[in-house]
Amino acid sequence: MGEAFFMRKLVSTSLAIGLIALLAMFSSVMPASAHTTDSILKDHIAAYAHLYLRVHKFAHNDSASGYTAAQLRKAYGVSQLSNKGDGVTIAVVSAYGNPNAQADLDKYSSDYGLPSTKLKVVYPNGKPSSVDEGWALETNLDLQMAHVMAPNAYIVLEAGVDASLDSLFGAVKDAYINQGADIVSMSFGTNEFDMETSNDVDGVLAEGSHKGISFTAASGDNGYGTQYPAASPYVTAVGGTTLNTKPDGTYVSESAWDGSSGGISMYENRPAYQKGFNRHGMRGVPDVAMVADPDTGVSIYDSYGYSGQKGYFVVGGTSAATPLFAGILALGKQIHKARLGNADTAIYNIARTKYASDFHDITSGSNGSCGDVCRATQGYDFVTGLGSPVANKLVPDLAAQ
């Protein structure tokens, strides 16, 4: 086991990447004055994130301190399912990409007993001139966690030319217009802004939703507060937990991770599917949650290198939770055959009658000091949403919707 270290790094994006417990604090940006997609998005690319990284590196033949693929699959009930995502396409949207993504996924799969898969790598707005090591590690995190939950799914890596919201949303749209994605996983975000509800911003996600696409997005790692695109009503926002299991992965308990972003949207009205769960008039975030606490993080492999180290890392953040849940949605889509569309509609509908069986209700922990809004409570809350999935129950019920 390598030693733990902390580092701050300034990157040119407003990501909520949650990468490696990246507790990001986004700077504010001025609202857009024009009503075109390019103008609105380009007006929101100047924010920067201060990243607080916690990375534990270890050699493969040492005991891993992060959760393994088998432990994650067992903890959330995926190992009890026979389906593995066959015939489903998951698109992972990231910036810059990772030149070693395929080789690293092969290594991870071999080491943890998963089938190999052939990635399709797409650069929808041009190939970047350089690679950012933080985003490279993020890319591998997303790919490997999606593969854990849906090991037979086809995975497309949509690598934006840079970390601007404009570039990343271009990749999102390419995923469902040109790449046949059924599920799109987005481990990035920015502060909410007043034009996010326009047809040219939310409209990108609405268009995909109407085509049957399911979107997942990281709620963020900043504690209380909402970010976009997680706040969009067309997205399943994924928060973070501290996961406790037995050594074999048997689920014991979860509590809210204090970094899990969530709260009440400033601009998005409460969607119909949240009626009865969220008493406020605005959209509540997140919808669900999965493991994100770096102290109970996940093992991933990266040979590109991060801060001078290569190999296995233990990472956390809601960008670990997000592709994990995307993989679970892929299992539901496989059984359902037809695309699921906005998964929130089905998820909340299931929770109305099968909450106790299909979700782990997370009732302890908080993400700030703002009263009830910041505390995990019985039922839906603004830290962990409905809680974490019991996939062996939730997946068949998703397929039956």
Image (spheres, grey):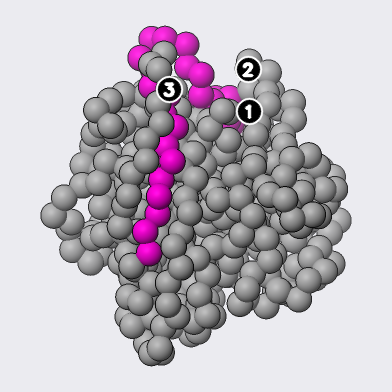
Nearest to the observer: residue 288 or residue 173: 288
Residue 307 visible in rendering: yes
Query: Residue 394, how many percent across, how many down?
Result: 71, 47
| Mark 1 or 3, nearer chain start | 3
Q: Secondary structure at mark 3?
A: loop
Query: The magenta stretch spans which residues?
Result: 47-74
Whether residue 155 is in magenta: the answer is no
Left/right of residue 239 with respect to residue 10 in the rendered view? right
Residue drawn where x is 68% and y is 70% of the image: 283
Is 109 situated above or below 159? Answer: above
Quarter of the image with the C terminus is bottom right
**How many neighbours does mark 3 have within 10 angstroms: few (below 14), some (14-19), or many (20 or more)?**
few
Measured from the top left, where is residue 32 in percent x and y? 41, 83
- 262 w.r.t. 51: above or below: below
**Location of mark 1 (residue):** 74
Answer few, some or many: residues within 10 Å of disc 1's Cα (few below 14, many 20 plus, some between 14 and 19). many
Q: What's under tag 1, amino acid-wise? A: Lys
> Is 383 in front, or is 154?
383
Q: Which residue is mark 2?
A: 248
Mark 2–mark 3 CB contact (< 8 Å): no
Question: What distance separates the C-alpha of mark 2 from that of mark 3?
Answer: 25 Å
The quadrant holding residue 244 is top right
Number of marks present in the image shown: 3
Mark 2 crowd level (few <14, some 14–19, many ≥20, 10 Å Cα): few
Q: Mark 2 and 1 residues: CB-CB less than 8 Å, in contact?
A: yes
Which residue is situated farthest in the left direction here? 129
Of callouts 2 and 1, the N-terminal one: 1
Vertical comparison of 110 with 19: above or below: above
